[in-house]
Image (spheres, rainbow, N blue to C red):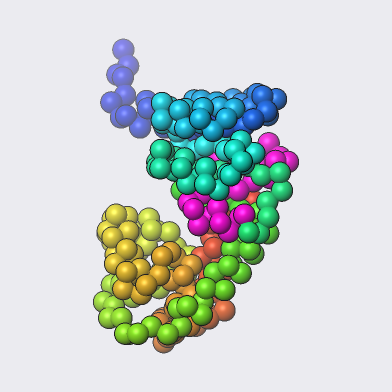
Amino acid sequence: MGQRSSNPEQTEKPQAIRVIIADTQSIYRVGIRKILALEDDIRVVGQAENFEQTVAAATRYPADVILFEAAITANHREAVSELIKHSPLSKIVVVLVEPAEEDTVDLLKRGVRGIVARSISPDLLVRCVRKVAAGETWLDNKGVNWMLEAYRSQAALLTTPRIKPRLSEKELNIISFVTQGLRNKEIAVEIGTTEQVIKNYLRKVYDKLGVSDRLELALYCIHHQLLKNRPGQASLPNTAAETILTSAAVAGNPK
């Protein structure tokens, strides 16, 4: 008689990505559900046709990703902020008829993790769900350019710090990896620590420099030559912000 394997990795399947579909039109809810049902690693755990039902579903059925149609409420921007309060662990993908620049920038700043057009193809929608569930951001090429322009417009606010911040060698190393487009998990491997430790360091760096995210950090480095003369930073002034943003998942990117 053969022995049963005692290795849990051989017997346990990874948990499926849990999705809530919030859409005013039943035909789209049914269609999206059928598309996602074909994927073994994705499971629809709830549906909603108005904002109240969306909040109720997100509260009752913890989800990894919420596909949120903008037209489900009169003010989808405020609705997104409210939904994040009720379901902070869920990653929201907003579905718009046609994404626009102002809307895209505002929604990303509110914490949305992806923006897609109503006409997105089934295969790209599935890829979007997987990427966002994995912690990445999903934008099309226009959205990437809009976000870059938005952050560039804030650069002037970062050019005249009152006091030159004091950064440790480890903090500078972490900043260097960030500007090269590495994610927290990858930086942790490079330095030999945990992902949580990297997150803690980055929070301290943000506080010291007066920035709020990785792109503002890149812009700060550009304008203040923070990493000047450090190994591997020769091309920083031209590519840092672009590297960080485009390292996120972008629709149509095969990687």
Of residue 60 and residue 119, the one placed in the foreground of this image is 60
Q: Is residue 125 magenta?
A: yes
Kindly indicate the quadrant of the structure image that contains residue 164: bottom left
Task: Report the side of 164 relative to 149 (left or right).
Answer: left
Q: Is residue 27 magenta?
A: no
Locate the N terminus by quadrant: top left
Q: Residue at x 38, y 83 (%)?
A: 161
Q: Residue furthest front?
A: 74
Of residue 3 and residue 175, the one placed in the foreground of this image is 175
Where residue 65 sits: x, y (%)? 50, 38
Q: Is residue 130 visible?
A: no
Where residue 251 sits: x, y (%)? 64, 51
**Total marks drawn?**
0
| Prevailing SS of the magenta stretch | helix
Where residue 192 sits: x, y (%)? 28, 61
Task: Report the side of 126 relative to 16 (left or right).
Answer: right
Q: Is residue 19 visible?
A: yes
| Residue 173 position (above or below residue 82) | below
Magenta span: 103-132
| Residue 149 position (above or below residue 69) | below
Where residue 222 sits: x, y (%)? 48, 80
Q: Residue furthest top?
A: 1
Q: Residue at x 52, y 47 (%)?
A: 78
Q: Residue at x 56, y 56 (%)?
A: 106
Q: Residue at x 66, y 44 (%)?
A: 96
